[in-house]
Image (cartoon, rainbow, N blue to C red):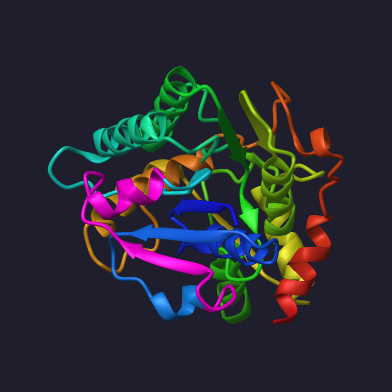
Amino acid sequence: MKSIVIFGGAGFVGRYIITNLAKKDYRIIIPYQKPTNEAKLRLLGNFGQVIPLYYRDLKDHKLIKILNNSQICINLKTHWSSNKIGFDKSILDFNLKLSNLVKNSKSITQFIFFSGLGVDEPQKSLRSKAIFEAEKLFHLNLVNSIIIRPGIIIGKEDNFLSRLIPIFKISKIIPIFGNGKSRIQPISIEDVVLLVEKIITNNLKGKHIFELAGSKIFDYIELYKMIANALNKKRVFIKIPMIFCKILVKVVEKTPFSPISLEQLYLFEKDNIEKNIDKNLKFYSIYPQDIENIIKKLAKN
């Protein structure tokens, strides 16, 4: 049985990937640092198949031993502490150390890194800039490194529609950050999971970049109208100038109750769409699901 190490596996995308790969008879190890529901993760596979592993840092001997006895490593880690060395530096520090561990591993033959659409474009987001640097670092250090750049990923329990839909259900007024004209190309979690499965089962080697996006492009106003229609609700959309949004978020994000960070707000200022610079879902003959139908299904829950 092949072993797969998945950093960030306890999150939304990770849980779907684990559930799918567990059906293919892989042994899956999920390193974690923050408090995690181990029992919930174990239930994603058969008895003893999914193994949560607490590690203090990347020097942990238990973690290094696991990496030296696994064949595949996936890095989904996207949440970073801004303590001590700074937000962007913490991303680079972690990924530099991880790339060295993978490079020195005696057994890992595939490495998959989840990035994001548009990280290679000029922008204000420190997170996106640092993740793009991490991409380059992995491609430089590793013989086999596969970069996956997804757009906004949607599905049950996601971090986007699962937050928006409840607001649409109870509020007649919906705020829009900025002018609402930035374009997005959401993709279903099932399509993302299928691509990961194909990459692994086909034993893809070398250096590759996949851009993952849905079949349709929307601006935020169009998407919000789609959500309202799916719920059969009439809603009033109020555009809030971005300068006021930034002032408010800078104040609120310092509290534990902030619904959005300044880094996330930057995403509303730019397009998040596929550029077809390398590979996409069609590389494995995967055709994206219709996003409007997915929204209708999620709205019924």
Image coordinates of residue 195 in percent, x first then y, are: 72, 46
Query: Does the stretch in magenta take in 290?
Result: no
Residue 274 drawn above or below residue 290:
above
Q: Which residues are magenta?
A: 43-68
State which quadrant residue 263 falls in.
Answer: top left
In this rendering, would 192 be left or right of 290?
Answer: left
Residue lying furthest left in this view?
A: 84
Observer able to see residue 197: yes
Q: Is residue 83 left or right of residue 179?
A: left
How many numbered tags mark residues here? 0
Residue 55 is covered by the magenta coloring: yes
**Outermost residue, top direction?**
140
Above or below — where is 282 with respect to 234? above
Q: Position of residue 179 (x, y in %)?
A: 57, 43
**In the image shown, does 119 or 139 lie closer to the viewer?**
139
Q: In the rendered view, would you say 212 is above or below 81?
A: above
The image quarter in which residue 148 lies = top right
Horizontal placement of 157 versus 230: left or right?
Answer: left
Q: Position of residue 260 (x, y in %)?
A: 39, 57
Tell me what residue is drawn at x 63 percent, y 65 percent: 22
- Rendering coords of residue 71 (x, y %): 53, 44
The one nearer the camera, 53 or 231, is 53
Name the image quarter holding the C terminus. Answer: bottom right
State the residue at coordinates (26%, 34%): 93
Location of the N terminus by quadrant is bottom right
Residue 175 in sight in this render:
no
The residue under the point 56% across, 58% down is 13
Between 276 and 114, the one lying in front of the other is 114
Q: Nearer the viewer, residue 299 or 212?
A: 212
Which residue does the image show at 78% across and 77% down from the upper left? Answer: 232
